Structures are given as structure tokens and as C-alpha cells.
Amino acid sequence: MSGHSKFANIKHKKEKNDAAKGKIFTIIGREIAVAVKEGGADPDNNSKLRDVIAKAKANNMPNDTIERGIKKAAGDANSVDYVSVTYEGYGPNGSAIIVDALTDNKNRTAANVRNAFTKGGGNVGAQGCVSFMFDKKGQIIIDKEDYDGEADDLMMMALDAGADDFAEEEESFEITTSPEEFSSVRETLEKEGIKMLSAEVTMIPQNYVSLTDEDDIKKMNRILDLLDEDDDVQAVYHNWDE
């Protein structure tokens, strides 16, 4: 999706009800647990944890909730052990969908994901069947309302920090990086006090698919809604040009 539509989607999600916020907090809580397990509880020595904390703050997660999550992950030797799994498949009209999940029960998650695809007239495919249609990139979205400076200054700051590209959209700025440079670019902006609407490593489609048939649009929304309701699902990427 373009930076503008990505911006609109993020704004829409943030304005949804408290149930949606609960889902976001569940997602981030699991990411905190995995980051602490992999790199320790000290954000100064764990760049992945720093990135998750930044994501948590961008989603208005309270600081005490973040700290509790870190302490729980660090101190509970019997905490749930999450496994990262990725599913790939097709929606209506050959649209491509990638689903990232963190789960303590792969059989449950696989069944739920398959069910979501089936109910929307799609199907889960083999590993790698659609991921080649996407580029893995760091993506930072900044709401123009949250930035008082000049666009050129922001662009130079991002590029000097290691960003690959900078785009100005109608209501936002979009910065893209390699996955390896994402943390350093995000941290540079953070140190300058720049508020980020979204900052994450994501999958960006190389091309987009249009859905013109009303039934296809309903089916695609059905798949995405069911996946969004599943607590095991961390992120969904697709190439539907909404």
C-alpha cells in the first residue's frame, strides 16, 4: 500500500474501540516476551527490545504495562514459550497474504489461520508461495501534524542515519530502511524527539492487486477480520490495493 493508505490504515486502527487496543497490547506483550528471552531485559543492550518498546509507546501502551511485561518475561522461568510461525496464501483474485504469528500451540494457530482463509474463499499455500512478491523493509510513518520542521531536514536526517528512501505523502512522511538499519534510523529520530505514528519491520508488496467485485471485497475483508481477531496473529501483510 502507498504511504498514504498505510497512514490512513494506521490512523483508522488507532481510532477503533478498546477491544482493538486490547489486541494490540496482547501482540506487543508477546513481542516483549520474545525480545527479552532472546536478548535480555536491559533495553540498552537489546536493540530488538528497544524497537518493541518504541512500538508499544507509539500505540500508547502505558509505561508501567511495558515495565511489567519486561519484568515478567525476565523473572518467570516458567513463562509461556512462544514460537514464531509464518503462513502464506491466496485471497480473492490471486491476492497474496502473509500471516506472522507467535503461538504456544502451532496446531491451534494453523487451524485458525486455515479457517480464516477458507471462510474468505482463499487458501493457505506452501512456504514461499507469495513472500517473493514482497520486500522486507523497515518502515517509519510520521504524521505531518506531529512534525514542525522542514521536510528536507527530516529527509537528510533519515538518509544520513542509514535510511534507503524518504517519501512525502499528503498527510505523512514515510521512511524506508533495510531491516538491518531500521533500529539505528528509528533511534536517531527518537533522540531528536520526533514522534512516530508507526515504526516497524514490515513486508511491502512489490505490486498491488485490485478487487472490483463486491463479493471479492467482502471475502477479502472476511479473511482479514478473522485473522485480526486471532490473538496468535501478530501481523498480516497483503497486496490488496484498498
Image (cartoon, rainbow, N blue to C red):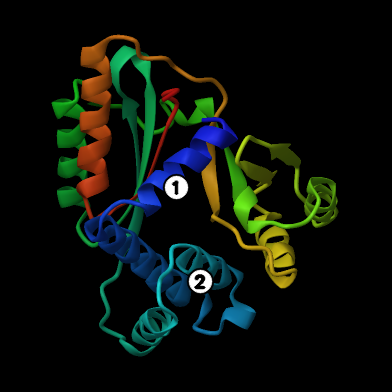
| SS at mark 1 in the image | helix
Q: Nearer the viewer, mark 2 or mark 1?
A: 1
Q: Residue at x 52, y 45 (%)?
A: 202
Q: Quadrant of residue 120?
A: top left
Q: Residue at x 31, y 86 (%)?
A: 77
| Residue 6 placement (x, y as % from top left) | 50, 38
| SS at mark 2 in the image | helix
Above-or-below relation of 181 to 116? below
Above-or-below relation of 208 to 224? above
Q: Residue at x 57, y 72 (%)?
A: 50
Q: Quadrant of residue 215?
A: top left
Residue type beneath disc 1: Lys
Asked if the residue at tag 1 contacts the one at tag 2, i.e. Cβ–Cβ closer than 8 Å, the answer is no
The residue under label 2 is: 53
Q: Quadrant of the C terminus?
A: top left
Residue type beneath disc 2: Ile
Q: Residue at x 16, y 43 (%)?
A: 112
Mark 1: few, some, or many residues within 10 Å (few <14, many ≥20)? some
| Residue 45 placement (x, y as % from top left) | 63, 80
Distance of mark 2 from mark 1, alpha carbons? 19 Å
Above-or-below relation of 184 to 152? below
Rendered image: mark on residue 119: none
The residue under label 1 is: 11
| Residue 153 placement (x, y as % from top left) | 84, 52
239 vs 194, nearest the viewer:
194
Mark 2: few, some, or many residues within 10 Å (few <14, many ≥20)? many
| Residue 31 placement (x, y as % from top left) | 41, 65
Mark earlier in primary sequence (2, 1): 1
